[in-house]
Amino acid sequence: MAWTDGAPRKGLRTAVLAAGAAGVLAPIAAQVRVGRAARPLTDRWQRTPVEPRGATRLGISFRPRQAEALELDVATSLRTLLAYPFQLIRLGAYWNSMEPAPGRFCPSELDRQIEAAEEAGKQIIVCVGAVKTFGYPEFFVPDHHLPEPLPEGSLIEPNGHLALVDAATAFVTRVVERYRDRESIIAWQVEHEAVDPLGMEHSWRLSTAFVQREVDAVRAADPNRPVMMNGFLPTSLPVGAQQWWRTRDQGDSLVVAKELADIVGIDFYPCHAIAALGRAAVYFDGSRTPWQQHRRRDLFDWAAAVAGRQVMVSEGQAEPWETVTNPPNPDNEAMRSCLPEHVIETYNQCMRWNHGAPASITGYLFWGAEYWLRRNLDGDPRYLRAFERLLAGA
């Protein structure tokens, strides 16, 4: 068919572009939820089936600074949580707490946490940092090691920050040497989401070479234990595209973890708020979208290909992720991004990853245990009860 003027061509081009835009926007629209943020409490968590865990060890991460932010006693909170029958706990070596001034080393808080976990019969992963450790604000460099802020928009290379990388490797070495004789410790975590930017707060990123120096220091101090590194697994297309763009020069933390670590930890958050609209909010909800399966399958293939490689869920969402730092705690309601039943449903989704996979998830750490305690103190035991029910049924 011959075109005799530009109008049909323009119409066809417009139609093609519209169809292409629709093809891109439709999956994104399917992952967006808008609605009232606080929802009435229900007992749905009592009826949600629990997937068997098989050989996967279950556990939690303990965030002492988050416990303080929620006005909880740190030692009491840890003892309460350790009484539950899970197998694994992740503890953090927070650099600015352990080295509050030049020449001072104050490991007593971490000493007590490790001793309490050992008394409870738990296995332990210690995140040695140094620059980034799990738990907001994630950045825990002592002021005396960083007289000026790291430059925004930059890649933090060892050659340009020799004093920082030397101090960081000295710190991780000292931590590992202090605890390497503890049989309860099964792995060292190096950095937290090592080469990703710190959310929207900071746009600088650690380079792979910087993190490599830290990994080498940990392996030199303890050649016998595996190194774990974690990364955020995007569950929505917009977040995945943003992460790819911001880390395109060297790959994101999951890419680097495959290069440097023995254990890759997946941080998995199916639903989180991106904007508040009065009492409502806009959410990215990737809990039912399969597009991220390619990256996950790639990690399982990696773990199956080389002896000693493992994949775990280092953070499974079990507390709300709203538009504020501390999760909201409304009376007689719960937040849409993580209702009590979602503690079980997100776990179930990850356990189903094992079905037919060439490797299995070796550990699953629930993220949000301190929030459960705060809710319980304020009259809502559902998050804790959901956790109890899951442990009993898994």
Image (spheres, rainbow, N blue to C red):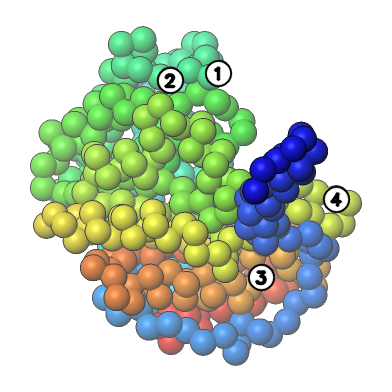
Tell me: 262 left or right of 199.
left
Residue beneath disc 4? 277
Q: How far is the residue under mark 1 from the one under mark 3?
A: 36 Å
Q: Which mark is residue 152?
A: 1
The residue under the point 14% across, 54% down is: 306
Residue 393: in sight, yes or no? yes
Residue 127, percent from left and from top: 35, 44
Query: Do labels 4 and 3 touch, CB within 8 Å?
Result: no
User: CA separation, marks 3 and 2?
Assistant: 38 Å
Report whether 147 appears left or right of 376: left
**Closer-to-camera residue (103/301):** 301
Q: How many marks?
A: 4
Query: Tag 2 or tag 3, which sits nearer the N-term?
Result: 2
Rendered position, 221 above or below 166: below
Instruction: Please give the label number shown on residue 243.
Output: none
Q: Do the residues labelled 3 and 2 touch (CB within 8 Å)?
A: no
Q: Which of 97 and 66 is in front in this view?
A: 66
Q: What residue type is labelled 3?
A: Leu
In the rendered image, which residue does mark 3 sit on? 339
Q: Residue 155 carries which label?
A: 2
**Of marks 4 and 3, which one's residue comes earlier in the chain?**
4
Going by the numbered disc 1, the residue's amino acid type is Glu
Q: How crowded is mark 3: few (under 14 residues within 10 Å), some or many (20 or more)?
A: many
Q: Element under label 1?
A: loop
Q: Closer to the N terminus: mark 1 or mark 3?
A: 1
Asked where in the image residue 360 lies, by quadrant, the reply is: bottom left
Q: Can residue 128 be seen in this view?
A: no
